[in-house]
Amino acid sequence: MSSAAATEISDQFETPILDAESSVLLHTISEHGGYAFVRMASQAEAGDFRAAEAAREMAWEQLHSGPWHSVQPAWRDAYSMACLRVAKLHFASGEFKEALRVLDMGLIMGGTLLRKDLDSAVHKVSSKARVSEAQGVSNGSSSSKSECELVHDGLNKAEILQMLPEKSLSGKTVVKRSGLSMEGFLREYLLNGLPVVINDAMTHWPAMTKWKDLDYLKTIAGDRTVPVEVGKNYLCSEWKQELITFSQFLERIRAISSSSSSSSAAPTYLAQHPLFDQINELRNDICVPDYCFAGGGEIRSLNAWFGPAGTVTPLHHDPHHNLLAQVVGKKYVRLYHSSISDELHPYTETMLFNSSKVDLDNIDEKVFPKVRDLEFVDCILEEGEMLYIPPKWWHYVRSLTTSFSVSFWWNDTENSTDS
């Protein structure tokens, strides 16, 4: 790292929680046998970059020493601590992108103790990075409007049907409602456990215009690190996960979207990720719908679903009330009532108990001869619409275009203690 750069940038991001909790956390780590980590962390605090990276590597190894649920919480916090130390040294040297990458790893993989320090550090480093990038941008480097648009949709119904499972859009469709009151939503749908599409509850979201602009997304989140899924879906053997920057992710979407339909490129999907906890600027572009508070209860999770056309979430069910808000692009959604769970052949393995063995895109009639005749409802979820999916309803989702959605999970009062 350049010492000249370090002298040019004298300000530092502050870590008040780390400063207050460091000694207690290091003592706890010592009790778990992390003496080498404690030694490296102490040297890192004094400005030793190699020691800071060594401490981060030691904590990383502990995070991968067994199943995630068996990792000691103190080691997750230790990883956050090490990320803050490393990022602080990168920041002091003007290496803002590296600092952001390390801080994001702390947010994604670390514990909760130092979350506020990580968030405030990200805010400061992001601000510095944008100023630095703006100063280095050439006046001649501008994109055309078409290059900046995220979705180019020219699909007709015949083209859509070719992408979808057999019998799609041929029977009952999910009811679509405008001007649905809270009382009406509660009485007609939530209490009766019935799905509904609400088509006028997102018009005031800044995301409805901002998220269609690739330049905006790159400016706000381009240097941030996010986890993505690569492959057809999580039930396939070739499926894997990667950590890449948001700019790299956007470039993959652009490349897949512009390639021919015969392209063998594996889909890349940012799926069920708490992106809005990680990137506050994107969180400010959306609002939690009032419908999520009908009947009491509380929000359980708020997740992003972002990927190119063709990404699929296979048939599964979730334990919570769900509002799936379609911000950019369009999706096909098929739903089966929870009462026919057995006919949908759920996996018996603990990790997949809420997923069906039936591949709706290629149903094996010899193994599942009755599935084609099971009753379902479906819909095309358009931009600006949100779909209410009741708990335990089975659903299959396919992106018809590049698509950016937000899911709001919540529990009602009776089940508010559920995990």
Image: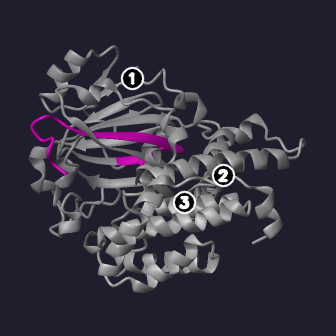
Residue of label 3:
103
Going by the numbered disc 2, the residue's amino acid type is Ser
Of the pair 193 and 282, the residue shown nearer to us: 282
Between marks 2 and 3, how big is the CA–CA gap? 32 Å
The residue under the point 58% across, 68% down is 86
Tag 3 and tag 1, C-beta contact below 8 Å = no
Residues in magenta?
397-419
Q: Is residue 330 left or right of residue 73?
A: right
Residue 186 lies in quadrant: top left
x and y percent of residue 156 in the render?
52, 35
x and y percent of residue 248 in the render?
63, 58
SS under mark 1: loop
SS under mark 2: helix
Residue of label 1:
199
SS under mark 3: helix
| Colour setup of the view | one colour
Residue 417 colored in magenta in the image: yes
Characterize the local packing of mark 3: few (<14), some (14-19) or many (20 or more) Cα atoms within 10 angstroms. many
Of the pair 211 and 122, the residue shown nearer to us: 122
Circle nearer the N terminus (2, 3): 3
The residue under the point 30% across, 73% down is 71
